[in-house]
Image (tube, helix red, strand yellow):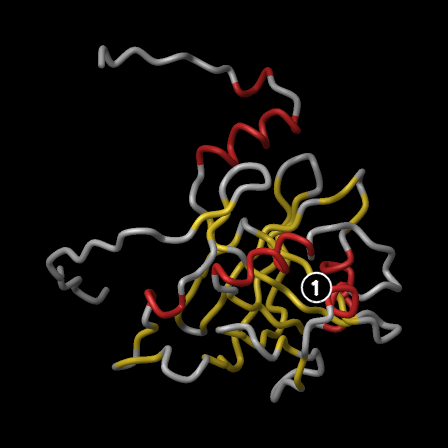
Amino acid sequence: MDGKKMPIDIRSLTPPIAYRLMTGIVVPRPIAWVTSLSAEGVLNLAPFSAFTFVSMNPVLIGINIGRKAGVRKDTEVNIRASGEYVVHIGGFADRHAIHESSAEHPPDVSEVDVLGLATTASDRVEVPRLRDAPVAMECKLDQIVSFGRGGSEFVVGEVLLVHAREGLVKNGKIDTRALDPICRIAGPNYASLGEIVTMRNIELAEK
């Protein structure tokens, strides 16, 4: 390898081309599989891979939600209206349902019904959660922050309650191998975690 690189002036790219490039660079990405409830009572389900946690006190998680042709997606419309939603972490075994739930449907169509997924009542929010997802986090909207010129908005929610499949939590930690979370790559491509390597534990001083 000679170390040569191909320079790419990303500012010269159209937003769709830049998106395609960046989703192949920022990998792998966890997927927030989100249920939200419309004002008419329709249960929406959609996956978002621009997803992370942003605070531990209180516990806050964030999802970047873009717009489609300048229009807010159903998930964000519902969250803005109700202030509640549930974020699920799916396993690799859920990859087909997660991928299919990204298909566009009118607001009056429930992806949960289309896919035949079982749900159950949540404890702290009105939005039902997926019964068989390994992890579900009941969330209350904290704030929404706008970024860029394309209408992307970072939706931050406080986690009120976590549901974890029996056996996933060991010594206060999630057994990642048992969870087998699905990861998003560029395009319609997904991956499992693959090999997990354990390094020495480095204690970080609290600030």
The N terminus sits in image quarter: top left
Residue 123, image x, y percentages: 61, 89
Residue 197, image x, y percentages: 20, 54
**Up/down of 102 relative to 7, above or below:** below
Q: Quadrant of residue 169?
A: bottom left
Q: Nearer the viewer, residue 52 or 164?
A: 164
In the figure, is residue 69 to the left or right of 157?
right
In the figure, is residue 137 to the left or right of 44?
left
SS at mark 1 in the image: strand
Q: Which residue is mark 1?
A: 45
Q: Quadrant of residue 105?
A: bottom right
Q: Nearer the viewer, residue 160 or 131?
A: 131
Residue at 49% across, 41% down: 185
Residue at 25% across, 55% down: 196
In the figure, is residue 66 to the left or right of 142?
right
Residue at 44% across, 33% down: 25
The C terminus sits in image quarter: bottom left
Q: Residue furthest left?
A: 200
